[in-house]
Image (spheres, helix red, strand yellow):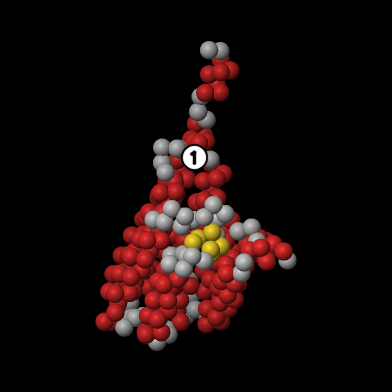
Amino acid sequence: MNNSALSENKPNIFRVICAWGVHLFTATGAVFGLLAILSIFEKNWKMMIVYMIIAMLVDGFDGMLARWADVKKYANGVDGALLDNILDYINYVMVPALFLVKADVLPENVRLLAASSILLTSAYQFTQTDAKTDDHHFKGFPSYWNVAALYMLLMNLPQWVNFGFLMLFNVMVFIPIKYIYPSRNSYLRTLTLVLTYLYGAIGIWGLLQYPNQPQWVVWASFIYVGYYLILSVIPKNKIHAN
């Protein structure tokens, strides 16, 4: 075997380090999930919010980094999709479930029921083979329980209203609507990305003001929520036709 053949078979150490570094970056989501849980036990909602935000940012950027580092080629000993699902279940389901039990956002006599319901419906949703479709959608209501929990904390709605919304979202898990994956969405892509980043930036700024967050931030955020839902439920052929 000549030298050129050996060089072709030799792994690129820099790329290998980068790929494993991305997996490590993804795994830090578990640490921030633990820190959020500890904050919940202390009822330190401010720090819970901070750690939830960091965990969401890790989740938001790790996919892009994984594609850049080509982890499937240079760190194929780790199943990145499985790692991502484990961390999503911790941060998007377990953390908000504990919050529902410990916070005063739900009637006390149904808190354990509500927390258990999202644990069970999310276990179903996460294990569906087509939970994430080939055309980059979530089938059924995505497990955005952390977002729902934050709205409950910030909006201070009546506890039974919060419980009603929570039960509605649980039912929506089983309705096979294809919800868009914002960062990989192909319809109105530029507008969707602009609104998504704007929603994230303003939302993070507003959350970090807690408990003195401007109420206009909360209500303005529903513009994006409405856009997201409408884009998800409208037949996609109509969007392409326009």
- Residue drawn where x is 46% and y is 82% of the image: 155
Residue 171 showing in the rendered view: yes
Residue reaching furthest top?
A: 1
Which residue does the numbered mark 1 point to in the structure image? 72
Q: Is residue 73 left or right of residue 231?
A: left
Measuring from the top left, give residue 91's x and y in whole percent.
Answer: 39, 61
Residue 198 showing in the rendered view: no
- Residue drawn where x is 30% and y is 69% of the image: 116
- Residue drawn where x is 55% and y is 80% of the image: 219
Quadrant of image for the C terminus: bottom right
| Camera-nearest residue between 177 and 5 | 177
Measuring from the top left, give residue 85's x and y in whole percent.
Answer: 41, 54
Count the labels in the image.
1
> Image quadrant of residue 222?
bottom right
> Image quadrant of residue 45?
bottom left
Residue reaching furthest bottom?
A: 158
Q: Is residue 108 left or right of residue 165?
A: left
Secondary element type, mark 1 = helix
Measuring from the top left, give residue 161's x and y in whole percent.
Answer: 41, 84
**Crowd class of label 1 (few under 14; some 14 to 19; many from 20; radius 10 Å):** some
- Residue drawn where x is 55% and y is 55% of the image: 136
Residue 183, relative to residue 212: is it above or below? Answer: above
**At label 1, which amino acid type do we have?**
Lys
Measuring from the top left, give residue 73's x and y in whole percent.
Answer: 50, 36
| Camera-nearest residue between 150 and 161 | 161
Residue reaching furthest right?
A: 242
